[in-house]
Amino acid sequence: MEKNKSVNEEQFQKLNKGDKNKYVKEWSCECGECGKKWAYLDSVEKEMKRQVTGNALMGLGMCCNPCVTLSTSNANTQLSKQMKELKQCPECKSSNAQCKARYFSK
Ligand SMILES: [Zn+2]
């Protein structure tokens, strides 16, 4: 029994569709400044993107209400910041990072 079996992008692309669904995509990053390594799930980033899009649409529908528009853009600023932080070194806050996709079997 292998636990947390991981494959790289190239190996993943060779899998058939059914097998792809058994994997979770993760980004593995390494800081170009201090060498710190960290990882985050692709689904986390996707969920944030989805929320930004959703908020933007909501903002459009309520453009006559300045309060809603303002809070929506604040929420999006927050989300954009969080999305940026995913790719940023947690140690030295550098954005000089190399991120590679990895896939883990569920
Ligand atoms: Zn760093």
Image: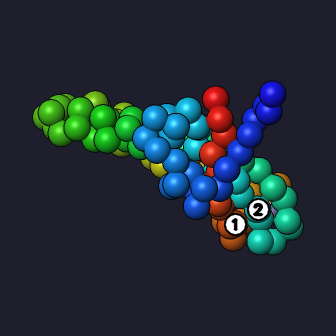
Q: Are marks 1 and 2 in contact (CB under 8 Å)?
A: yes
Distance from mark 1 CB to nearest ligand 1 atom below 8 Å: yes
Image point (70%, 53%), residue name: 28
Question: What element does badge 2 sit on?
Answer: strand
Category of crowding for the residue at label 1, using alpha-carbon neighbours closer than 10 angstroms: few (below 14), some (14–19), many (at least 20): many
Q: Would you say residue 45 is visible in this rendering?
A: no
Give the image quarter of residue 91. Answer: bottom right
CA gap, disc 1 and disc 2: 5 Å
In the image, residue 56 lies at what x, y percent?
A: 28, 41
Label 2 amino acid? Answer: Glu
Indicate left or right for 27 with 34 as reference: left
The front one of 1 and 67 is 1
Q: Which mark is residue 14?
A: none
Label 1 amino acid? Answer: Ala
Image point (63%, 45%), residue name: 103
> Which image quarter holds the N terminus?
top right
In the image, residue 77 lies at what x, y percent?
A: 45, 46
In the image, residue 13 lies at what x, y percent?
A: 51, 55
Image point (64%, 29%), residue name: 106
Question: Residue beneath label 1, please?
Answer: 97
Give the image quarter of residue 54. Answer: top left
Q: Which mark is residue 30?
A: 2
Question: What element does badge 1 sit on?
Answer: strand
Indicate left or right for 43 with 88 as reference: left
Q: Is residue 37 above or below residue 31?
A: above
Q: Is residue 33 above or below residue 85?
A: below
Which quarter of the rendered image does ligand 1 occupy? bottom right
Give the image quarter of residue 65. Answer: top left
